[in-house]
């Protein structure tokens, strides 16, 4: 009898162990899903034109509104810091993904034309291969992977993405996902919490 119980217990442990080992690593570590990974290395930069002229940004690698919406125009003297991450080919040429800190106190990651920014670093060229995800709850997207970044707004009203919306996940950083999605103000490339997507 004892031998039979021992054999059953051993067999049960083996089944449990096999089941645990079969869980994908990404699912076992974050519980949300397996998303593409890309480590963004930042490098200091500065604007080319130091006059009061404004430089135009875009939320994705394209001319403003073709197809991504614009990300705002910024006065050079109002920019307190710039960090560049990578080049990306888009509609009409290459773009530089950049983190901008502005005099009003907000921080945003946006795309700029290389002609607007100077930097000495040799940046990588990236080509994201996104995967589809679905929002499990409504979220207000932000301009970077964290809560220090400004959020997406239309005028003074926050832009919200509804539960059930499909997004294209490009990569994960710091518990946030870099995604392409259609919002109420147009196509944007933006950041949302990873725990809101499956």
Image: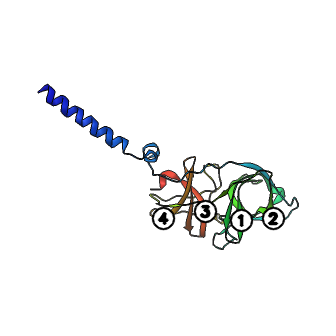
In contact (CB < 8 Å): disc 4 and disc 2: no
Secondary element at tag 1 = strand
Q: Is residue 178 left or right of residue 23?
A: right
Residue sitting at x 52%, y 58%: 139
Secondary element at tag 4 = strand
Residue sitting at x 19%, y 31%: 7
Cα separation between marks 3 and 1 = 16 Å
Q: Is residue 63 placed above or below 33 in the rendered structure?
A: below
Pointer 2 residue: 54
Camera-side mark, 2 or 3: 3
Pointer 1 residue: 94
Among the two numbered marks 2 and 1 on one chain, the one whose residue lies closer to the N terminus: 2
In contact (CB < 8 Å): disc 2 and disc 3: no
Cα separation between marks 2 and 1 = 20 Å
Q: Which disc number belongs to residue 133?
A: none
Picture coordinates of residue 120, whole percent (x, y): 80, 51
Secondary element at tag 2 = strand
Picture coordinates of residue 78, whole percent (x, y): 81, 56
Which residue is at the front of the view, 93 or 143?
Answer: 93
Among the two numbered marks 3 and 1 on one chain, the one whose residue lies closer to the N terminus: 1
Q: Quadrant of the N terminus?
A: top left
Where residue 16 sits, quadrant-wise, is top left
Among the two numbered marks 4 and 1 on one chain, the one whose residue lies closer to the N terminus: 1
Among the two numbered marks 2 and 3 on one chain, the one whose residue lies closer to the N terminus: 2
Pointer 3 residue: 189
Q: Which disc number belongs to residue 166?
A: 4
């Amino acid at each position: 009898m004892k031998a039979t119980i021992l054999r059953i217990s051993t067999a049960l442990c083996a089944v449990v162990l096999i089941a645990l080992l079969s869980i994908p690593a990404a699912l076992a570590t974050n519980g949300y899903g397996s998303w593409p990974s890309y480590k963004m290395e930042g490098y200091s930069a500065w604007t080319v034109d130091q006059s009061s002229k404004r430089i135009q940004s875009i939320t994705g690698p394209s001319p403003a509104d073709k197809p991504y919406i614009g990300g705002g125009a910024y006065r050079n003297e109002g920019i307190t810091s710039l960090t560049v991450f990578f080049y990306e080919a888009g509609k009409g040429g290459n773009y530089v993904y950049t983190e901008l800190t502005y005099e009003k106190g907000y921080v945003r990651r946006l795309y700029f034309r290389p002609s607007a920014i100077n930097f000495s670093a040799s940046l990588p060229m990236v080509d994201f291969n996104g995967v589809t995800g679905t929002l499990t709850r409504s979220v207000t997207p932000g301009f970077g992977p964290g809560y220090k970044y400004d959020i997406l707004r239309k005028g003074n009203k926050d832009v919200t993405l509804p539960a059930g919306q499909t997004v294209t996940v490009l990569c994960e950083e710091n518990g946030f996902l870099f995604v392409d999605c259609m919002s109420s103000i147009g196509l944007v490339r933006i950041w949302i919490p990873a725990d809101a997507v499956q």
